Image (cartoon, grey):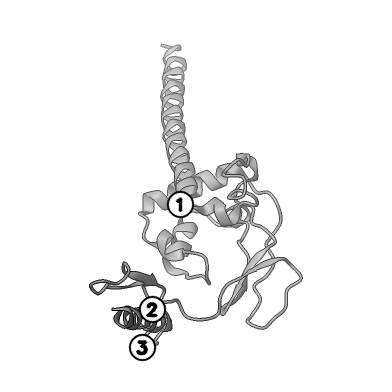
Amino acid sequence: MRHVPYLLGIAWLAVVSSLSATYAAEDDKRIDHGRYLVKIGGCNECHTEGYARTFGKIPESEWMIGREWGEMGPWGTTFPVNVRLLVAEINEDGWVARIRHNTTRPPMPWYNLRDMTDSDLRAMYLFLRSLGPAGKAAPAYLHPGEETKFPHVQFPADAPRPPRTEVSPRPGLQPAHTCDTEAYSSPPSCIRESVQSRTTALSSQAKRS
C-alpha cells in the first residue's frame, strides 16, 4: 500500500504532461494561424521596413517593428507603430478590446481588424507575442502643419475622385473615351474636351463631303 501514493503521483504527472502537450499543440496551431493572418492582411507592408520593397523577403525576426518614415496627409503625419512592443504591454483580452473599440488615423485600415472574429484577433496576438519585443518605438504623431525630420510619403489633400466615367460613342465617331471625372464638376473637362474634338471632326467631314 505504501507504493500507492507514488503510483498515483506518476499517473498525475502523466496526465499533466499530456494536457500540457495538448495545449502546446493547440497554441502552435493558433500561432500559425496568426502568422497567416498577419501575412495576408497586409500588416507587414506598413509595419515591417522593406517588406513590400523586397516582395516579402524579410526575416520573420524583423517583422512588425514599425518604421521611421511616415504618411503625411490632411490628418497630419502618422508612423506605423512597433506592434511587438505594443503587445508586450497588454494581455490578450486587452488586445481584443483595443481593436474592437479604438480607431486610428489613416492610412491604417483599423476597420478591417475590427471586423475580424475574436479567435482571429487572439491568434494574431499569440503570433505577435511569440516574436518577442524588438526594435524601438515609432516617432510620435504630428498634427497637420507640423514639420517632421523623418522621411514621409505625401498623400493628396483633395477629396477622392468619383468613379471613372465612360462616354458612349456616336455613330461614325471614335470608340468611347474614358477619363477620370473631376470631383463635383458637371460636365467634367475631359468629357467637354472630348465632345468638342468630336464636333470638330464631324464639321471637317461635312465640309469635305
Query: Helix, strand, or loop for circle 2?
Result: helix
User: Circle 1 is placed at which residue position?
Assistant: 41
Residue 21 x %, y %: 45, 27
Q: Is residue 189 left or right of residue 106?
A: left
Q: Is residue 158 left or right of residue 70?
A: left
Residue 98 x %, y %: 48, 64
Residue located 39% across and 86% down the image: 184
Q: Work out whether 21 lies above or below 100.
A: above
Residue located 41% across and 82% down the image: 193
1 or 3: tag closer to the N-terminus: 1
Q: Work out whether 44 lies above or below 130.
A: below
Residue 161 x %, y %: 43, 77
- Taking the view exactly as shown, the residue that stands out farthest to the front is 209
Report the front residue among 73 and 33: 73
User: Circle 2 is placed at which residue position?
Assistant: 194
Amino acid at circle 3 = Ser
Query: Helix, strand, or loop for circle 1?
Result: loop
Amino acid at circle 2 = Ser
